[in-house]
Amino acid sequence: MKSYFPKDFLWGGAIAANQAEGAWNEDGKGMSVADVARFKPDVSVEDYKSQWHTSLADIAIAKETDDTVYYPKRRGIDFYHHYKEDIRLFGEMGFKTLRVSIAWTRIFPNGNEEEPNQKGLDYYRDMFEELRKNGIEPLVTLSHYEMPLYLVDHYDGWVSREAVGFFAKFSETVFREYKDLVKYWLSFNEIDSVFRHPFTTVGVVEEKYADKKATEEAIYQALHHQFVASAQATKQLREIIPGAQMGAMLTKTMTYAETCDPEEVLMAQKANRDNHFYADVQVFGEYPKHVLNYFEENGFQIERTEEDLRLLKDYTVDFLSFSYYMSMVVSKNADKREKVGGNLTTGVKNPYLETSEWGWQVDPVGLRISLIDLYDAYRIPLFVVENGIGSTDVLTKDGTVEDDYRIDYFREHFKQMNLAIKDGVELMGYTSWGCIDIVSASTSQMAKRYGFIYVDTDDYGKGTYNRYKKKSFHWYKDVIVTNGDSLYAEQESERTAAEKSPAII
Ligand code: BG6
């Protein structure tokens, strides 16, 4: 097998400001929804609903304290002060790109100021310049679970139309500021996650709404505002940085039917269509009919002005990016089946797949299926911007981690990407999630590590914060430098060695 990765394939890694930077109240930064996320050691890691649930009381408590032990996203891995060192390591691995996000609250601390915070602007300028010095193309997410808390308190987050205007000011500011440095942009991280964790994504605090239905309606309204804000940002980008590209960002939740029972196949199809709804709006520029029918059936009054609809239609995205961690199974008999956890969701266990330590089903072939599905549906370039395995790593006495399990995970996923490219999929690049260990989004643990680089700190922030290269660091470097050839060279050398010393029979 040969490598089909195109010459200019963007190999790299991904992090988000709120999980990496720390320095939550330095240089004028305001509080964001991430600074409210409390580490809950007593809650089971599979119980994603309790992990993410945020009440008004939680917000009030968080606002009163400067604690960083139980609010790990406030300290992250101190990337804010270590970025030069970290970027050098990414450069050493040969990264072509690094996906980062801009914390909105570093630029507009409350979200509604007239003037941006100069120190915040300077920080990202320095960071992007450092990336360029190391030959790394920045890929920048405008919003990765980082909305200003002030907008939640004073405007009901994204449910308020005002959020669109505040965001437009933020996006225009950063486009103007970094027009010479950043070419690839993403608007909203995992835009479909609004229903899975509404507080972190759209600032919806469930108890503010009368019942489940009212909450759902509010989330749809907030989501609509994000769609509009994304189209508005695309419009600005076209004007301010000609030639730059805007991507949508979806959580690809590949769903299989448990059996070939047509009813179950239909259930799986529905799950996949619901997942694609978000990309439909951002790629085709209009709401799919099944979603409009759903609004009607439920009596949802979502305010969607003529101007909004025009904007959505006129400013669709250039590429579709997505995260891929696992696949799911639906069954008519779900209540009788063993369950598995997942990327903020739960499903039926797939007997053909292994699970990670955190119960996520590892499915490299599912990545190939996802790539083909998405490409066939949308026919625009794709970009895998998150993928990886969270595991407990042990630092050895020699200052490394023998993470062969991670290497195996990536090898299988990369081979499936290669096959998808052979199948005709246009794939721009790949950024592994948490290329350096960072705080987990869902559990706020440090113990759940994804990186090629180990960071010496624990769930309570103790440690030196020193960085160590794991075994996978060197392995990924080889993959990048050979543009995927090394994936097959390993096999080739095993084959030749076996031929040279045949087993005695
Ligand atoms: C994605 C998010 O859902 O999954 C990331 O975009 C997150 O922010 C990643 O970190 C992995 O999830 P977790 O909970 O293991 O950190």
Image (cartoon, helix red, strand yellow):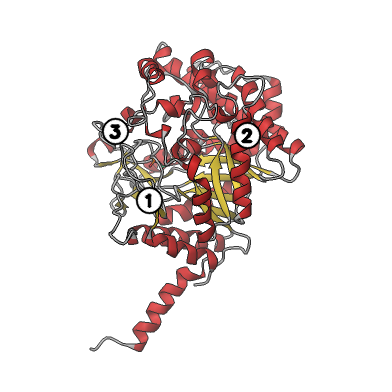
What's the CA distance linking mark 1 and mark 2? 33 Å
Badge 3 marks a residue whose secondary structure is loop
Q: Are marks 3 and 2 in contact (CB under 8 Å)?
A: no
What's the CA distance linking mark 1 and mark 3? 19 Å
**Circle nearer the viewer, 3 or 2:** 2
Residue 218 appears left or right of 403: right
Badge 2 marks a residue whose secondary structure is helix
Pointer 3 residue: 47
Q: Amino acid at mark 2?
A: Leu
Give 185 or 470, whichever is nearer the viewer.
Answer: 470
In the picture, residue 283 is in which quadrant?
A: top right
Residue at mark 2: C-beta within 8 A of ligand 1: no
How far across and how far down the image is residue 212, in percent? 40, 18
Q: Residue at x 59, y 42 (%)?
A: 140
Pointer 1 residue: 389
Pointer 2 residue: 121
The image shows residue 132, relative to residue 38, as above or below, that is below
Q: Amino acid at mark 1?
A: Ile
| Viewer can see residue 441 | yes
Residue at mark 3: C-beta within 8 A of ligand 1: no
Q: Are marks 1 and 2 in contact (CB under 8 Å)?
A: no
Badge 1 marks a residue whose secondary structure is loop
The image shows residue 107, relative to residue 183, as above or below, that is above
Q: Residue at x 58, y 46 (%)?
A: 377
Q: Is tag 1's residue or tag 3's residue first in the polypeptide sequence?
A: 3
Residue 46 appears left or right of 144: left
Q: Is tag 3's residue or tag 2's residue first in the polypeptide sequence?
A: 3
Q: Residue at x 42, y 58 (%)?
A: 410
**Circle nearer the viewer, 1 or 2:** 2
How far across and how far down the image is residue 116, in percent? 64, 26
Neighbourhood count class around disc 1 (C-alpha, 10 Å): few under 14, some 14–19, many 20 upward: many
Q: Quadrant of the C terminus?
A: bottom left
